[in-house]
Amino acid sequence: MLQVSELQKSYQVGKNRYEVLKGVSFTVEDGEFVAVMGPSGSGKTTLLNCISRYIPVDAGQIKLGRTDLAALPEEALARVRNRDLGFVFQDFLLLDGLTVQQNILLPAIIGGTISDQTEEQALNMGAVFGISHIMNKYPAEISGGEKQRTAVARALINHPQLILADEPTGNLDSKSSRAVIDSFEQARTSLLATIFMVTHDSFAASFCDRVIILRDGIVVKTLVKGNRPRIAFQDELLDTIKELGR
């Protein structure tokens, strides 16, 4: 599915060069829910922006299936972003002038694939994510959790190979955070989605199959949930982050 190999990224500020990613490598398999955690400044957001190619990389490969995203020209990359990648952002990024249903359909509208079938898919996703009752409402009329579930449905409307989620629970209370994580789990179960999430939230990460730990631009550890209870996995995540913080 996703294979990142020896990814490097640095920034030039005046005469100083700062290495942010220093040869990061990992894979995400079909149907996995994988998170990246790490202390502030570890390179989490830069990593996600490199995978989506919103910023260029210095070296390394980013393969989605057989396609090397790092080598794609901008026009081809735009098609991949619309067709093969779904995005969920911390700030929702819903359009205020569109209803919930229209926001869900937005990638299909942009891609020119809107049809009766996609409109039916949007209604089905509303049922899957528990937002059928707000499909005709506008973003200003719904809660934060409902906005984020709308964003998850929007990310899935084109049946992408991979969902990239950037701090999806960062602006939410605990109840809304759980609703969003439930939406991701429902997307895996019902829609066979593959999810790669950057988060600082150990609660959200504890629902993942694996958590990749970054520090100072390198992968220092990968934690696997396995068959353990979620709370035991969260305790390990908290202990790991505390240790890195020291």
Image (spheres, rainbow, N blue to C red):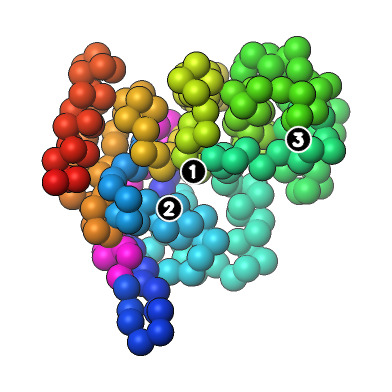
Marks 3 and 1 sit apart, C-alpha to C-alpha, by 18 Å
Looking at the image, is 132 positioned above or below residue 68?
above
Q: Which mark is drawn over residue 70?
A: none
Residue 159 position, x and y percent, is 62, 35
Residue 233 position, x and y percent, is 23, 23
Report the residue at 59% width, 70% height from top.
73
Amino acid type of disc 3?
Answer: Asn
In terms of image quadrants, where is residue 106?
A: top right
Q: Which residue is mark 2?
A: 45
Residue 88 position, x and y percent, is 57, 39
Dot 1, how many residues are within 10 Å of its Cα: few (below 14), some (14-19), or many (20+)?
Answer: many
Report the residue at 63% width, 63% height from top.
76
Circles 2, 1 touching at the beta carbon (< 8 Å): yes
Q: Which residues are magenta?
A: 19-33
Q: Which residue is mark 3?
A: 103
Residue situated in front as seen by the camera: 104 or 175: 175
Circles 3, 1 touching at the beta carbon (< 8 Å): no
Looking at the image, is 178 positioned above or below residue 114?
above
Amino acid type of disc 1?
Answer: Asp
Q: Which residue is mark 1?
A: 166
Residue 47 position, x and y percent, is 40, 56
Assess whether residue 47 is covered by the magenta stretch. no
Q: Is residue 72 left or right of residue 40?
A: right
Dot 3, how many residues are within 10 Å of its Cα: few (below 14), some (14-19), or many (20+)?
Answer: many
Amino acid type of disc 2?
Answer: Thr
Looking at the image, is 189 positioned above or below residue 84?
above
Residue situated in front as seen by the camera: 97 or 154: 97
In terms of image quadrants, where is residue 224?
A: top left
Q: Earlier in the sequence, mark 3 or mark 1?
A: 3
